[in-house]
Amino acid sequence: MIPYGKHLVDEDDIDAVVDVLRNQFLTQGQVVPQFEQALCEYTGAKHCVAVNSATSGLHVACLAAGVGQGDLVWTVPNSFVASANCALYCGASVDFVDINASTRNIDIDSLEKKLLQAENRNRLPNALIVVHFSGMSCEMQKIRQLTQRHSIVLIEDAAHGLGGSYQQSKIGSCVYSDLTVLSFHPVKSITSAEGGAVLTNQRSLFEKSLLFAKHGVTKDAAQFKGESHGPWYYQQLALGYNYRLSDLHAALGLSQLKKLDAFIKRRTEIADKYNHALANLPLKLQIVDPQSQSAWHLYMIELTQHSRQAVYQQLHAKGVGVNVHYIPIHLHPYYQQIGFKQGDFPVSEYFYQHALTLPLFPSMTDSEQNQVIDTLIEVLS
Ligand SMILES: *Cc1c(COP(=O)(O)O)cnc(C)c1O
């Protein structure tokens, strides 16, 4: 079975991890700061806090943004549940803005309308979490214009986006946002096994992120309330968590980061080939915003004449491991129990009914891709 995604770990990566095991601190050593520095250099962001997953990173970003009890956070239904759960962890409520049928990212018109309604009802969100679905950036400049006038904190869930860019800047640069969260889960652009990062250009958000990711504890005397007791002293200033990344994981991430551009180049080649080979099939292919270079985390097709269920089963039977992204968050039983219902976000629901994710990963061979293409043509004819 050709999987829809797969990590690519080589001897350099293994050596980097073994080197930490043999010679260095397993956690709280020098490798995590090196990884954070390298992520800043790659993305252009000023500050980075490495964490043990993007899920932790989204929680930390919400906490740093000041999201708390009684607050409101908006995100999109077409994402993994972590994009919404982070707000609930903070005691806030969640609501969704539907996606655009072409970009599958947050729909700008829907956002504008919903903001107007929210303003009239005096219930504006405290934060908005946008998702760069499949690796293609949302229209960040427009989103920033809309959210800035209401002082809504803008968070990018860039779990799919590392290696992509928007308007000449790398995703993660935070040019149009307050915070960006990355994931290093094995199916994402690069992996640290489990891992994530919070990026920001704002010193105060960085300091808060650091605090919440490390028990709410600081050793920075400048932040102490009252006098230091001595060189051993630290203070807990907030209720934080242990969301640290270990040096073992950071060593893998740092080694992988060196190969990120090569991974994205190969992902782009595969996507281009799909675009050409599938152009005449009864499918809606992914569009790419001319302002964007996608990281091509996922290659989506939308079926226009066939049953998704049938095509999924036929492809699996023939060894093509297609997947489905995403079950809209508001349709999960947990979110239904909170009060969301079928029909609330029709564009996400329609997309979910017709979408398939084709195999795409850097180590995919030409012959594997040809097999996917030929099988799909056969199944759809
Ligand atoms: C993978 C993913 C996450 C969660 O990432 P973890 O590192 O596994 O916690 C969050 N949001 C989106 C959009 C994702 O795809």
Image (cartoon, rainbow, N blue to C red):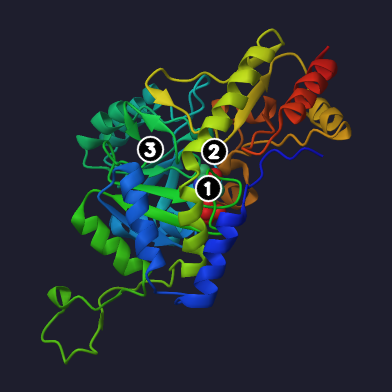
Q: Earlier in the sequence, mark 1 or mark 3?
A: 3
Contact check, label 2 and label 1, Cβ < 8 Å: yes
The residue mark sitting in front, 1 or 3, is 1
User: Residue most toward the right?
Assistant: 317
The residue mark sitting in front, 2 or 3, is 2
User: Marks 1/3: CA distance?
Assistant: 14 Å
Residue nearest the viewer, comparing 280 with 216 = 280
Disc 3 residue type? Ile
The secondary element bearing badge 2 is classed as: helix
Residue designated by label 1: 190
Q: Residues within 10 Å of mark 3 (few under 14, many from 20)?
A: many
Disc 2 residue type? Phe
Residue designated by label 2: 263
Q: Residue at x 36, y 75 (%)?
A: 215
In percent of width and height, residue 240 lies at 36, 71
Please indicate whether residue 3 sits to the left or right of residue 56 in the image: right
Please indicate whether residue 341 sits to the left or right of residue 132 in the image: right
Residue designated by label 3: 171
Q: Residues within 10 Å of mark 2 (few under 14, many from 20)?
A: many
Q: Earlier in the sequence, mark 2 or mark 1?
A: 1
Q: Is residue 321 above or below residue 230?
A: above
Q: Is residue 204 above or below residue 295?
A: below
In percent of width and height, residue 376 lies at 78, 21
Contact check, label 2 and label 3, Cβ < 8 Å: no
User: Marks 2/1: CA distance?
Assistant: 8 Å
Please indicate whether residue 266 sits to the left or right of residue 151 in the image: right
